[in-house]
Structure formats: structure tokens, C-alpha cells
């Protein structure tokens, strides 16, 4: 009997497609977290533990999911988060992703370590996009990237602050993406690629996977992804402080958002340093394991600095319902990373477009069934604690 072809409907469906299509080393690179992956799991679990209040006999004949993010309209409060090496998951992956984002009307953020350059992404869109930056040891590289971002009309810079050192990502170690590759690991990687011929032809041969986008001029000697990642790891500057953020603020006149804020005091310092926004994020559970979930810290950051900053959140968002929950706890938008990359790996641009369309429908349905007609009406009144007490890491057991 022939196998039924999976028609993806949920983020989990796209994850299954990605797992089937990608070499294991690449799938685990996206799918995995740090150490025991406790924080990665908590990001999603704590969102699931938040309940929604069903309300009836409200006029929800006209539900409007649109909002404003970083001064520009968006069809839903969602941003495609920066994901390093996304272009390894599908041919010229970042270009496919921004085309999908444009089609649905949400912002896209390009990673410094994406495979497609600022210029290539700009050529694929008529809309302004965001750019994510790490503070590299060579400040000359940073200045050059900022100038290139300005030249392609990037208006929002997302600066990642939670990568002083790289987290302990053991899936990458086991797969040979971190550390040396010798003996059986080299053979295993070769077999992994051979057993995924669709990826090997589409991306490995046609996708120019060793052209490292924005950093090609600095890493022209890189022969493979391991060389590239080694160079990147050596460029992370563990000595970065708030003074460097003030320097960045002087160098960059556009909107500045700091990604990786998990402490209310740090949010206040971000505002003091001149940032217009922060992303409450633990890097998808890929950095400090046993850190609290992003959703559990969101209300505290909003309370501390929400009047001074736009507060976004990322980590564990897997549906339009999750988007609504985060918005009800004060996030002006959420960033999604793994979901769009799974969709990209599984079905390319069409997959990302369909994923975002489904999320928009889920947001609209959730708003209607909670009696809310617009994003401004999303407040903690529509939420309840289902018993798992996700906000019990410190302080009260609930945040609403």
C-alpha cells in the first residue's frame, strides 16, 4: 500500500518534514539546545501551561490581527527571527524566507551568519528588513557590516547580547559540527550526506553552501561549515559590556533592539544605553541550560521597562495561540526561529508562506474565541494558569 504524503498543517508537521529531508547534522543543529536541553523544553512547556479563557456572545465578526512592529505595519505580531546558516537548510534559504515574509506581511531579520548576504536579500525584496549583529573582536568588521546594512536601507538592527561564549551544544559535538572531525565521525558525516540526495543536489551542489554571505570577505579560506563555525566562535568577544552598546548606539542611528535580555534590570540598562527595544530570549535554549523560559520572564521585563521599550519575545512559540499568549503578557511581537526554518527545509518558500498563513489564521481564531477583536485588546484577562505555574521560578506563581 503506498505511503500517504504528509500535508503539513502544524509546526510539528514541518519539523517532521525537515527531519526527513535534512542530513542529521543540520537537523540537529536547528533542533537541538544546550546541555540537557532543559531550557529549550521549558520554553515550549511553559507556554502550553498557560490557559485561555473562552468568551462567548461577543461581536467578533471583524477580527483584526494587524499590528505595528518597530514602527512598521505587520499582518500579525510575528517576526522571522535571525537564524544562522539558514541557507544550509534550503537553496539560498534566506532569500526564500524573506519572499515568504513579504507575501504574508511580516518582518524578516537576516542573521550575520546567514548564507545570503545583505545585498542578495535586498535584491529579493522591496521592503525594509532587519539585520542581526554580533559584536566581533574586530570592530572594523562591525563598522563595515553596519555601513553595508545602511546602504541596503536596513532600518532595524537586532544586536544579540547572549553569546559571550557558545553554549554546550552536545548534539553538534556528537555530529562533528563542533570540534575535530576524524575517523568514524568523518565517515558518518559522509554517509549522512549520501543518504539525503535531495538536499545534497539542491543545497550542496546548487546552493553555493560555502559562500558565507556577509562574512565571505573575512573567511575566504573556510573550506567547510566547521571552518566557518570555528572562525565565528573565535570572533565572539567575551569582553563586551554596556559601554560597547553605547559605542554601537553612536555608530548606528537607526532603531536598535537588544536580543537576549532575560533580566528586568538588564532591560532598564538597555533603555539607558539607547536601545528602543529588547527581545526576551534565552537563545532558544541554546546557551545557558537551566535558565528560565522566555515566557516566564516576559511579564517582569514588561513591568520593568515596557514604558521605555518595545518588548518582544522568542523561545518555544509553536502556534498562533502561543503568539496570542505572549501578546497578552505584554509582548508587542514574538520572534519565531525553528518553526520557519523547519518549514523552509521541508517545503522551501511555499512552506514558510503556508506556515505564516496558518499562524495568522490561528491568531484570528484564538482572538475570536477569547472575545477579542484587535491586538490592542490582548491582555492578561484572557489567560489563566493551568496548574503548572510557569511563572513560579521566583516571586508569585502567576504573573496575571
Image (cartoon, helix red, strand yellow):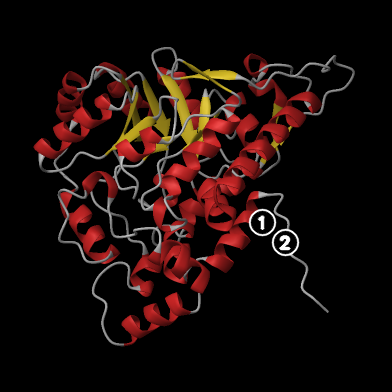
Tag 1 secondary structure: helix
The front one of 207 and 72 is 207
In percent of the image, x 43 and y 64: which residue is there?
A: 26
Residue 95, image x, y percentages: 44, 43
- Give the residue at the far bottom of this rendering: 183
Task: Estimate the x, y position of residue 181 in percent, counting from the top left.
Answer: 27, 77
Could you say where residue 295 lies in the image, as x and y percent from the top left? 53, 36
* Image quadrant in which the N terminus is located: bottom right
Q: Is mark 2 on a helix, strand or loop?
A: loop
Instruction: Mark yes or no: residue 297 visible.
Output: no
Mark nearer the N terminus (1 vs 2)? 2
Residue shown at 26% from the left, 65% from the top: 226
Give the vertical position of 370 relative to 387 (above or below): above
Residue 382 relative to residue 90: left or right: right
Q: Mark 2 Cα within 10 Å, few/some/many (few <14, many 20+)? A: few
**Along the viewing direction, whichever of 267 and 254 lies nearer the viewer:** 254
- Is residue 373 at least partly visible in the picture? yes
Mark 1 Cα-neighbour bin, 10 Å: few <14, some 14–19, many ≥20 = some
Q: Position of residue 108 (x, y in %)?
A: 45, 34
Q: Distance between the residues labelled 1 and 2?
A: 8 Å
Q: In this figure, which residue is indicated by the disc labeled 1?
A: 13
The quadrant in which residue 124 appears is top left
Cβ–Cβ below 8 Å for labels 1 and 2? yes
Quadrant hosting residue 230: bottom left
Q: In the drawing, what numbered circle is on residue 6?
A: 2
- Name the residue rendered at 42%, 38% in the picture: 281
Q: The C terminus appears in which quarter of the rendering?
A: top right
Amino acid at each position: 500500500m503506498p505511503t500517504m504524503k504528509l500535508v503539513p498543517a502544524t509546526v510539528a508537521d514541518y519539523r517532521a518534514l525537515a527531519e526527513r529531508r535534512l542530513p542529521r547534522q543540520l537537523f540537529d543543529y536547528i533542533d537541538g539546545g544546550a546541555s540537557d536541553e532543559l531550557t529549550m523544553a521549558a520554553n515550549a512547556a511553559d507556554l502550553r501551561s498557560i490557559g485561555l479563557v473562552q468568551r462567548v456572545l461577543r461581536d467578533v465578526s471583524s477580527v483584526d490581527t494587524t499590528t505595528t512592529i518597530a514602527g512598521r505595519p505587520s499582518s500579525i505580531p510575528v517576526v522571522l527571527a535571525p537564524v544562522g546558516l539558514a541557507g544550509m537548510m534550503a537553496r539560498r534559504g534566506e532569500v526564500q524566507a524573506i519572499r515568504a515574509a513579504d507575501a504574508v506581511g511580516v518582518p524578516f531579520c537576516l542573521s550575520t551568519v546567514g548564507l545570503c548576504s545583505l545585498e542578495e536579500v535586498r535584491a529579493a525584496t522591496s521592503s525594509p528588513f532587519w539585520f542581526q549583529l554580533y559584536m566581533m573582536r574586530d570592530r572594523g568588521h562591525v563598522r563595515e557590516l553596519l555601513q553595508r546594512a545602511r546602504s541596503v536601507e536596513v532600518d532595524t538592527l537586532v544586536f544579540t547580547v547572549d553569546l559571550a561564549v557558545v553554549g554546550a551544544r552536545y548534539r553538534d559535538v556528537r555530529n562533528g559540527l563542533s570540534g575535530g572531525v576524524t575517523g568514524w565521525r568523518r565517515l558518518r558525516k559522509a554517509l549522512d550526506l549520501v543518504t539525503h540526495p535531495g538536499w545534497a543536489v539542491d543545497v550542496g551542489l546548487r546552493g553555493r553552501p560555502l559562500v558565507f554571505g556577509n562574512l565571505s570577505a573575512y573567511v575566504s579560506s573556510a573550506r567547510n561549515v566547521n571552518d566557518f563555525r570555528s572562525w565565528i566562535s573565535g570572533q565572539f568577544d567575551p569582553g563586551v559590556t554596556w559601554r560597547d552598546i553605547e559605542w554601537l548606539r553612536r555608530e548606528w542611528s537607526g532603531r536598535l533592539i537588544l536580543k537576549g535580555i532575560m533580566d528586568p534590570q538588564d532591560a532598564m540598562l538597555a533603555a539607558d544605553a539607547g536601545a528602543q527595544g529588547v527581545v526576551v530570549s534565552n537563545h532558544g535554549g541554546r546557551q545557558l541550560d537551566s535558565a528560565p523560559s522566555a515566557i516566564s520572564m516576559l511579564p517582569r521585563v514588561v513591568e520593568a521597562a515596557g514604558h521605555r521599550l518595545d518588548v518582544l519575545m522568542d523561545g518555544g512559540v509553536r502556534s498562533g495561540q502561543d503568539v496570542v499568549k505572549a501578546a497578552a503578557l505584554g509582548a508587542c511581537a514574538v520572534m519565531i526561529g525553528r518553526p520557519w526554518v523547519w518549514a523552509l527545509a521541508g517545503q522551501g518558500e511555499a512552506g514558510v508562506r503556508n506556515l505564516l498563513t496558518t499562524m495568522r489564521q490561528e491568531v484570528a481564531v484564538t482572538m475570536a474565541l477569547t472575545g477579542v477583536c484587535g491586538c490592542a485588546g490582548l491582555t492578561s484577562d484572557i489567560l489563566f494558569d493551568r496548574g503548572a505555574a510557569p511563572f513560579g521560578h521566583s516571586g508569585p506563581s502567576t504573573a496575571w
